[in-house]
Structures are given as C-alpha cells and as structure tokens.
Image (tube, rainbow, N blue to C red):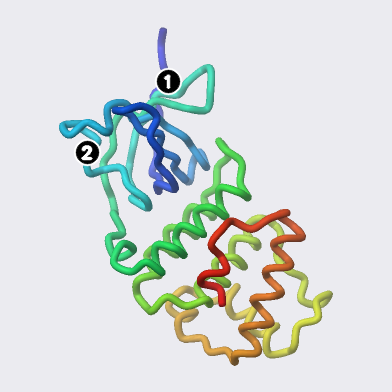
C-alpha cells in the first residue's frame, strides 16, 4: 500500500494523548488548513518527537495521509518557533488558547487557510511584546471575523462614534499600532458587549474563557 506523504508548515493548536505512548496533534497550516495527526511513540522519552510537540510551536512537518479518516500519521517535525514567552505569563497563554479555540470552532478541516494561519502567527508573536490587554482579544476577534466574511456592518449597529472608530482601528491596524490604541472605559465596555452579542448571534456560542480576560 502506497501512502501519500505531504509537507506543511503549521502551528500546533492542541495536543491530547491517544495511547500511553502516542499523541494526537492538531495543526493549523496555510496550505491544508486544520490537520490532525497522530505522533506515534511521541510520549516515549527517546522519541524523535521529544521536545518538538507543544502548544503554539510552529514547525515544518511531514505526514502520511490516511485514506480512511482525517487522522494522518506524523512522520517528521522540524521546529521553526516555540513562542516561549507565551509560557511566561498565564494571560498570554489564555489569550492564545482562546484564539486557537475560536479558529477551531469557526473553520473546517482540510481547507486552505493562508490568511487565518498568518493572522494567528502574527498574533502569537505580538502577544508577549506588551502587557496582556483586552484590546488584543478584540482585535483578533474582529480580524478573524473579517477573514470569515463576517465583518460587522457598523452602519447597522448602535455603537457610539468613538467605539465605531475603535472598531475600524482594531480592524485595520497592525499589532504594534494596536498596542498603542487608547479607549475609554465606556468604549471598552460597549465594544466588549457588542462583540459578545455578535459572536453569539453568528457562531451560536463562544469558546470558554473569554470573560476572564475580556473585562
């Protein structure tokens, strides 16, 4: 039996044990979108995967595509970036985990997602550059909604002029500029409530944990 071996660059969204020695690794890639692989023997101390499979690691990898399911066999991993700063403060890790969960909820498997892959890659790199703030989360939500074709129509909303401008700035600014944005407490509260309702309406639910750092 001939197996198709494919290569990709991906960011690890989630891992979980499959057996006592193996892991399931869920990736976000540019070319293939979300891909699930089984890393056989990865939990063994002398595994060739040791130290290479953890949350938000970015790596080049190869996998053998399964003909029977969407769970493919991981073959080789070469690390590009481990994003170690995300593990130095819990708030960074919480925001990154929420972003990963939101991507998993709103995208299909095996569908190319080049712009969403790049959005997550830049978001993870930007997070540790400044103190964790709700604006990071709001900007990610807005940018992801935009990529999904769900950009809020501000003309139909009931946001104040200042909050409308904040939405525009969060959508159009790069991450260094977002870190410098300022908003009043009233604007932040208005935007938080608006996005909460918008996400519920369009997605049906919001991944757990948002309230802890969107206050």
Left or right: residue 187 compared with residue 35: right
Q: Which mark is residue 148?
A: none
Query: Which label sits on residue 4?
Result: 1
Q: Position of residue 38 (x, y in %)?
A: 39, 29
Q: Name the residue: 24% across, 35% down.
A: 49
- How many marks can you see? 2
Residue position marked by numbered label 2 in the rendering: 50
Residue placed furthest toward the bottom = 184
- Image spot of residue 149 (x, y percent): 70, 57
Pick the front one: 8 or 181: 181
Residue at point 51% right, 17% down? 67
Question: Which residue is at the far left?
Answer: 46
Where is 132 relative to 198, above or below? below
Compared across the picture, whether 185 is left or right of 196 comes to left
Q: Residue at x 41, y 16 (%)?
A: 3
Circle 2 — which element? loop
Name the residue located 51 percent from the left edge and 59 percent from the top edge.
98
Most distant residue in the right direction? 156
Q: In this rendering, would 77 be left or right of 3?
A: left
Mark 1 Cα shell of 10 Å, populated few (<14), some (14-19), many (≥20): few
Against 117, residue 86 (above or below) is below
Q: Gap in Å between the C-alphas at discs 2 and 1?
A: 24 Å
- Residue 152, by quadrant, is bottom right
């Amino acid at each position: 039996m001939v197996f198709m071996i494919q290569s990709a660059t991906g960011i690890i969204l989630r891992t979980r044990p499959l057996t006592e020695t193996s892991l399931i690794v869920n990736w976000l890639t540019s070319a293939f979108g979300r891909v699930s692989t089984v890393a056989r023997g990865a939990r063994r101390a002398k595994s060739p995967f040791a130290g290479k499979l953890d949350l938000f690691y970015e790596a080049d990898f190869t996998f053998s595509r399964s003909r029977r399911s969407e769970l493919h066999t991981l073959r080789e991993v070469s690390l590009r970036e481990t994003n170690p700063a995300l593990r130095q403060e819990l708030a960074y890790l919480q925001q990154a985990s929420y972003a990963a969960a939101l991507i998993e909820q709103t995208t299909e498997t095996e569908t190319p997602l080049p712009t969403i892959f790049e959005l997550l890659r830049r978001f993870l790199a930007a997070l540790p550059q400044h103190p964790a703030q709700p604006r990071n989360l709001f900007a990610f939500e807005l940018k992801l909604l935009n990529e999904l074709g769900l950009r809020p129509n501000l003309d139909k909303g009931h946001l104040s002029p200042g909050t409308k401008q904040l939405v525009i700035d969060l959508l159009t600014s790069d991450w260094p500029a977002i870190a410098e944005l300022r908003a009043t407490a009233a604007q932040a509260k208005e935007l938080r409530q608006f996005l909460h309702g918008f996400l519920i309406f369009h997605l049906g639910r919001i991944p757990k944990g948002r309230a802890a750092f969107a206050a």
